[in-house]
Amino acid sequence: MIVEPKVFLIGESTVNKEGLSAFLTHLGVPEWTSNAPTDIEQLTEVYGRACYKSFGTELNPNITRVRGSNEAYISNILEKGDGSVLEHGVANFFFCDVSRVFTHELVRHRVGTAMSQESLRYVRLTDLDWYAPICIQENTAAMTIFEKTMEGLSNLQKDLSELYELDTTNDFNFKKQVTSAMRRIAPIGLATTIGWSCNMRTLRHVIEMRTDPGAEEEIRLVFSKVADIAIERWPNLFADYEMKIIDDLPSYKTVNTKV
């Protein structure tokens, strides 16, 4: 069955309010507060201000004024390119109904990430779902070839399951052995699921890299969805992004290229 890639934000860093309060008391600024719209943006601000003791003008004699809002503070960080403080906030995503074409490209981004992928050594395939790229969708003959191929590969999975009587055996090790063998005739275009966690600095980088017009179509589609989530969820951290439609897909770029 033809499917569309989906993106789910399932978690993100949160502030430990008691710990933050104790830290601020230790510094001597127990009354300091932030108007950050999210915990990740507050964490970014706290770590940045800690570097200069800029929670006010009383902690560092070199400071005569401070930026009062989270928006102004983060905007200055982005303009200066102080990307290291963006690494403290982490977001947790699941990408579903994506192909192994997509996952093979995603795993190239290792710095600042963690990944957990559906294992076809353990998960036995039956009916194969798949994503059809635009050039295939727009060509009726090509779509027919894709559909017949995927249907045939689905039937091969079912035939092998019946041959080895996998639905009736209780021997899990045997099931695992055969399931692992069967995946060798699964196409790289097979729809699958992968969990992906990353820090905010990495997220900004990968959005730019993977929505670029030169990137592969499916990963562009997925990370345009990620970008939409990021811009809505963390407005101050992604306020510097601009979107253009190029080749029918969104492309996101920041004006602050050093971050």
Image (cartoon, rainbow, N blue to C red):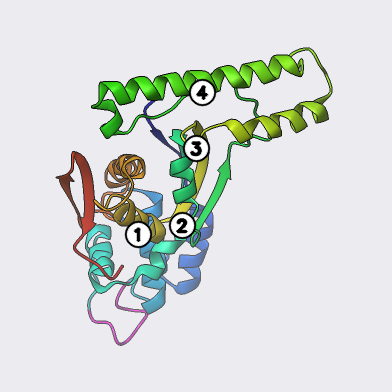
- Name the side, left or right, on which 58 lies relative to 9: left
User: Do labels 2 and 3 touch, CB within 8 Å?
Assistant: no
Q: CA distance from mark 2 to mark 4?
A: 27 Å
Query: Circle 4 sits in a helix, a strand or a loop, which is it?
Result: loop
The earlier-in-sequence mark between 1 and 2 is 2
Q: CA distance from mark 2 to mark 3?
A: 19 Å
The earlier-in-sequence mark between 2 and 4 is 2
Mark on residue 205? 1
> Which residue matches tag 3?
188
Query: Circle 1 sits in a helix, a strand or a loop, which is it?
Result: helix
Specify the farthest residue to the bottom: 62
> Which residue matches tag 4?
128
The earlier-in-sequence mark between 4 and 1 is 4
Report which quarter residue 127 is drawn in. top right
Q: CA distance from mark 4 to mark 1?
A: 32 Å
The earlier-in-sequence mark between 1 and 3 is 3
> Which residue matches tag 2?
109
User: Callout 2 environment at 10 Å: few (<14), some (14 to 19), or many (20+)?
Assistant: some
Q: Is residue 132 above or below residue 105?
A: above
User: Do labels 1 and 2 touch, CB within 8 Å?
Assistant: yes
Q: Which residues are magenta?
A: 56-64
Q: Position of residue 40 (x, y in %)?
A: 40, 53
Query: Circle 2 sits in a helix, a strand or a loop, which is it?
Result: loop
Residue 252 magenta? no
The earlier-in-sequence mark between 2 and 3 is 2
